[in-house]
Amino acid sequence: MKTLYTPEMAVIKKVIPQTPLETFFELELTERKTLGHKPGQFVEVSIFGLGEAPISVSSAPEPDKPTFELCVRKVGNVTNALLEKKVGDKIGIRGPFGNGFDIAKFKGKDILFIAGGIGLVPLRSLILAVLNRRPDYGRINVLYGCKTPRDLLFKGELKSWECGGSVECLITVDLGDESWQGDVGVITTLIPRVEIDEKKTQAVIVGPPVMYRFVIRELKSRRLPDANIWMSLERKMKCGVGKCGHCQMNDIYVCQDGPVFNYAELKKIPESI
Amino acid sequence: MKQFIIKKPKLFELIDKLARETTVIAPVKQENFTSFAPITSAAEIVWGAPQTVIPPKQFLYPQSEDLLAYEFGNGEARITGLNAVKERVLFGVHPCDLNAIGQMDRIWAEKNPDANYLEKRKAITLVGVDCLAPCSSDAICLRLNGLDPKGRFDLFLTDIGSAFYAEAATKKGEALVEGLRAPAKAADGKRLTAVQKKRTALFDKQEKKLLPKYKDLSKLMKANIDHPVWEERGKLCYGCGSCNMVCPTCYCFDVQDYMHVSLVKGVRSRVWDGCMTEEFAKVASGENFREDRSHRLRHRTYRKLNYLYDKWGESFCTGCGRCVKACLTKIVSPLEIANEIYSRKI
Amino acid sequence: MKPKVGFFSFTSCEGCQLVVLSMADKLLDLLGAVEVVNFREASSYKGEDYDVAIVEGALSTVHEIEEIRAIRKQAKILIAIGACAHIGGINCIRNFDNQFEIKKAVYGERAANFDSILAQPIDAVVKVDYYSRGCPPNRDGEEFVEIVTAILQGKKPYIPNFPVCVQCKMKGNVCTFHKEKPITCLGPVTRAGCNAHCPSYGNACIGCRGLVEEPNLNAHQETLSGAGLTVEESLNFYRMLNGMMEVGK
Ligand SMILES: Cc1cc2nc3c(=O)[nH]c(=O)nc-3n(C[C@H](O)[C@H](O)[C@H](O)COP(=O)(O)OP(=O)(O)OC[C@H]3O[C@@H](n4cnc5c(N)ncnc54)[C@H](O)[C@@H]3O)c2cc1C
Ligand code: SF4
Ligand code: SF4
Ligand code: SF4
Ligand code: SF4
Ligand code: FES
């Protein structure tokens, strides 16, 4: 009997190590044509014998594309095992889950993407979706911050987005090395360098919990209204379907009603940030 | 709703027969308490007080339940089937627990229906028995709208002296007592009303008073997120989850995989979990999204009296009193918390 | 290739070895997964070839400290099994008395000749990779095999960090504090994983699996004194097995 908790199988098509800790996967479902996700949604990745972990879908939604992409950082049982997997191996998938970004809200707007560390993974899905219909949007900036140059994800891609001239990327690291010639400092130091139009700019932030407070303060000092700020939150998750209770903040189930929230709404949820 | 009269000996005979033919689960003696367990005859049943240590939720949503079983062959996982569900009669359930089951029926069916619960639920015939006196000094059911079962049963029995007054809310309930029931007459209805009136007066006298109005509970909670009561009581919390485990409306779970040592097969199980425990909201990075025990106590209380109250229009504490008893430091009683907030305005 | 396992014994009753040997139905499965190369007293370990060392007992002589260091050098994985190895256990009761008097009581006039020091858990001297907790361990009949399985899988074993009460309640036990004749219990501050073995048999938990990471000892002091225990009696209760932990001190 299939239940809420029965995974489907997916075959690993590509494995590309990104950093010593993070690896990129391309997957294909065996029983369905396409995952059918929205940017910002996630799947529960299942390694039998170890458990499940919620992982954001990193590819753009393309209805005809049979594959989808994940980028995973090894931190524990499931993620460690995932990084041992090879092309041709099968893993379990449930989902997609969560609300995802409502891309229609960004039409005709300037978009300021702000990613910290692995936060670029869910953002990439939205960035690619936006780039697929570039003329629909105004100015696009990507601000990306990492601990060290070694931790940068999607390095090649960041360049290619810029090359087209359609996106402006600013990258900073907390701690540089000999070869690093870019910016050094926390991500908030990049914000003064982008143009913000209170009416038009939509800021989309994804990063570790500590980052949000500082980034928001900076954006508020540029008089960006709350309703123009979007973010994706992390919480412990076990089921992904609004039952197990782990992801709850006040009366909100992050796995169902999130992980994407508008800041104006989040402010009403005391346990959120 | 259909009303019947069932003679006591007839009902006991029926229980004996059912116990032989199928599984009947009812409260039986366990030391100075009771517990729900399969019975072999009506004589084993403890009617009324004392209450069971844990609620009957375990038969619909077991402490530990396999969600998947899998086997590895050729390096690939193959998902294997799970056990079929058995028909059972859950007998002697008190009104507070009937209400809780009614609430859980909504929770598990909502949005993403949970077949693991719903299949078991379908296979249960739910027989309630009315309480004529509070089951313990911890009971707060009358105050929290838990004493009226509101039709959340297949069959509901009230002892009116010589016989049981039976109400059937479903065809299943009617069918259960087919052949031994007589239609209730006006006189029986009068006796029922008299029994209920006396009982309610007794509960009102014995149960702790709720100072705020029941309908104001949710608002009261919402307005007092920073009340010192959370910090003061939270300081004495063990994070022992007892109040979660014994609560008929706590339903959070953890999921764990258990592999056989041969590494060729395993199961994924869900196990009762509780929002009061240390690791409930803690993620791999070490970040704990509800680290403070006082915040956990608030979360638990809000789930009962605010979040789910607002969503479904009733308190999700049905007043069974089990957490009041279970909590060794006496901090968790939703009624006492509400009273304290109400009388200590900030 | 099956990992090679050595089993070593320090100051203890050697009951943990017995527990492993007595897991009748699981033992065959276990032996199918690992190869046991040593199952003797610690002193005879030398020169053996093993990857995993399973160590029982507390350290209570200088000699034992040298031995555990040598074992740690050889073993890729070191598992401390039982309360003595994990938290010092019952051996630590002696630590709270006059050491000279104790030695004299045990060894008589020749006490000074005996190599005997304050009892300590294994991790007071070397790094321990995994713990199989309890006295005796494996009270629920599963945990030891689960730990070995997890190691074979390359996974961190799941060991709860919540109190015994969670599992005690799941089992539907009458809390020992609520019995007709109440008994005081260490369950609210002790780490679960034994399926509340002792309360399930009508006894109090005596804390054999060690404390949870954040025990609320103030609350427990209130609970114990509410049940009529003096501070002294409460301390002795902890010191039975948890003398080495902060509370015992
Ligand atoms: C919506 C969402 C999207 C995410 N997207 C990504 C992503 O794209 N790439 C990535 O590498 N990581 C992502 N994470 C984090 C990732 O889920 C955790 O790192 C992962 O669950 C750790 O599991 P583990 O078994 O390896 O670690 P363990 O420490 O063994 O964790 C045990 C279990 O606890 C739960 N858990 C632990 N940490 C987390 C966590 N941070 N969030 C949610 N549940 C957790 C999971 O159920 C996990 O299986 C995301 C988290 C969320 C909530
Ligand atoms: S909160 Fe306490 S009294 Fe209310 S239903 Fe749950 S266990 Fe019973
Ligand atoms: S409120 Fe009481 S029963 Fe609940 S976790 Fe805290 S100490 Fe345990
Ligand atoms: S008997 Fe001990 S472990 Fe069980 S609930 Fe009571 S205090 Fe907790
Ligand atoms: S109940 Fe306590 S003493 Fe008994 S086995 Fe469990 S942890 Fe050890
Ligand atoms: S992850 Fe289970 S409710 Fe959200």
Image (tube, rainbow, N blue to C red):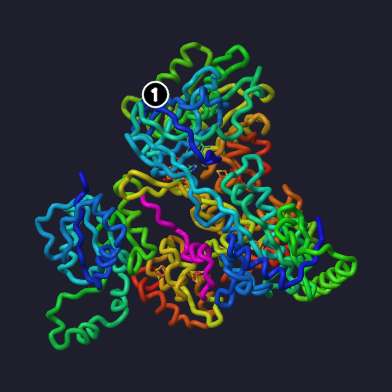
Nearer to me, A170 or B192: B192
Quarter of image, ligand 2: bottom right
Residue B275 picture location, percent across and down? 56, 55
| Residue C91 relative to residue A63: left or right | left
Nearer to me, B30 or B340: B30
Residue with the most extreme right position: B186
Residue at figure coordinates x 58%, y 14% from the top left: A133
Residue, disc 1: A13
Determine the image quadrant of residue C234: bottom left
Tell me if residue C234 can be seen. Answer: yes
Rendered position, C128 above or below A255 = below
Residue C239 picture location, percent across and down? 37, 75
Nearer to me, C63 or B145: B145
Residue A170: within the magenta?
no
| Residue B248 relative to residue C119: left or right | right
Nearer to me, A72 or A3: A3
Rendered position, A203 above or below C29 = above
Residue C162: within the magenta?
yes
Residue with the most extreme front position: B179
Kindly identify the amino acid type of the residue bearing the numbered disc 1: Lys
Instruction: Write down the region rendered in magenta.
Output: C156-176
Residue at figure coordinates x 36%, y 62% from the top left: C141
Residue at figure coordinates x 68%, y 36% from the top left: A264
Determine the image quadrant of residue A103: top right
Residue A51 picture location, percent across and down? 43, 43
